[in-house]
């Protein structure tokens, strides 16, 4: 059995900043956290965020938590705090068409690599939510329910979730029949009924079984119909260019700290 070194072991009562504090003490600072939003949705983009926090600033963000456990208002407040106090951050948006072309998991892993590569300085360690991401070039740890355990992953979860929710509200203005402003593209009873009645929109994920099934019920909106960028405002503009650019390249579908 490997020995345990008390100074380098996260304390159970150490709060969300326990991992970041221990890793900094061990010489691995700065620590980046990576998480995504929209993996389980059948419409809209996949959004991935990487965030670097100073362990000292974590205590100044009492509202930091897993984005799924926060109310919409609390998420928006936490989003502002993360942007204000983060040492660095980078957000990547991957559209539904790219998910259909290459697969959800491939896009998820690629998005995590791109979000990490988009940080201005290379972190000394990376924490990811749920599963490891190889090829980052630095040591890392996959933390089960990392957005509930580590501050940097929780912060990344908030940036990804709030960014995506705003995009889905913008998409609701273009496709009001589906209720994207309510369910954000996830599978709900209302969403299933809208799909059955109207067929999929251009921002649905046609590789998903429930979307494919809906295409056989009615004539769907043409998925290849171009989206006029002038009709989209704010974060939804990122959906117009959803192709994956090389790791580290800052595409139109990415936002970084100094942008």
Image (cartoon, rainbow, N blue to C red):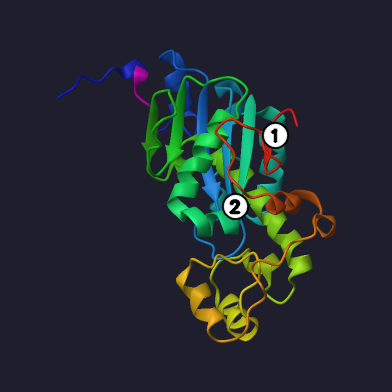
- In this picture, residue 237 sits left or right of residue 160: right
**Where does residue 34 sit, x and y in percent of width and height?**
51, 37
- Residue under numbered circle 2: 70
Residue 8 higher or lower than 197, as above or below: above
**Does the stretch in magenta take in 117?**
no
Instruction: Give the structural element (helix, strand or loop) at label 2.
Output: loop
Instruction: Give the structural element (helix, strand or loop) at label 1.
Output: helix
Dominant secondary structure of the magenta stretch? loop
Image quadrant assignment for residue 178: bottom right
Marks 1/2: CA–CA distance: 17 Å
Residue segment shown in magenta: 8-12
- In this picture, residue 24 sits left or right of residue 57: left
**Where does residue 109 sit, x and y in percent of width and height?**
46, 43
Between residue 64 and residue 220, name the one nearer to us: 220
Residue 15 higher or lower than 56, as above or below: below
Q: Which mark is residue 220?
A: none
Image quadrant assignment for residue 57: top right
- In this picture, residue 159 sits left or right of residue 152: right
Please name the residue shown 54% across and 20% down the image.
Answer: 122
Choose mark 1 or mark 2, whichever is in front.
1
Residue 246 higher or lower than 67, as above or below: above
Please name the residue shown 39% across and 44% down the image.
Answer: 130
Between residue 193 and residue 245, name the one nearer to us: 245
Precedes in sequence: disc 1 or disc 2: 2
**Where does residue 202 sit, x and y in percent of width and height?**
66, 67
Image quadrant assignment for residue 38: bottom right
Please name the residue shown 54% across and 80% down the image.
Answer: 214
Q: Which mark is residue 83?
A: 1
Which quadrant of the figure contains the N terminus? top left
Q: How many marks?
A: 2
Please name the residue shown 61% across and 74% down the image.
Answer: 200
- Residue extending farthest to the left is 1
């Amino acid at each position: 059995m490997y020995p345990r070194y008390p100074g380098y072991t996260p304390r159970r009562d150490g709060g969300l900043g326990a991992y970041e504090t221990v890793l900094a003490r061990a010489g691995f600072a700065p620590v980046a956290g990576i998480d995504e939003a929209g993996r389980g949705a059948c419409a809209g983009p996949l959004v991935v965020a990487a965030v670097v926090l100073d362990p000292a600033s974590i205590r100044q963000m009492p509202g930091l938590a897993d984005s799924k456990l926060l109310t919409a208002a609390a998420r928006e407040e936490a989003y502002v705090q993360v942007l204000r106090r983060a040492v660095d951050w980078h957000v990547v948006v991957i559209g539904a068409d790219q998910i259909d072309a290459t697969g959800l998991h491939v896009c998820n892993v690629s998005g995590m690599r791109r979000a990490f590569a988009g940080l201005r300085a290379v972190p000394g360690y990376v924490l990811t939510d749920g599963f490891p991401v190889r090829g980052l070039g630095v040591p890392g740890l996959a933390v089960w329910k990392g957005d509930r355990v580590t501050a940097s992953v929780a912060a990344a979860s908030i940036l990804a979730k709030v960014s995506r929710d705003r995009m889905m509200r913008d998409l609701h203005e273009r496709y009001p029949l589906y209720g994207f402003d309510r369910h954000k593209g996830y599978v709900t009873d209302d969403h299933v009924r809208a799909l059955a009645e109207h067929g999929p929109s251009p921002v649905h994920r046609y590789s998903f079984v429930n979307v494919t099934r809906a295409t056989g019920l009615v004539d769907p909106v043409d998925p290849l119909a171009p989206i006029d960028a002038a009709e989209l405002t704010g974060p939804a503009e990122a959906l117009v260019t959803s192709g994956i650019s090389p790791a580290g390249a800052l595409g139109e579908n990415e936002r970084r700290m100094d942008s």
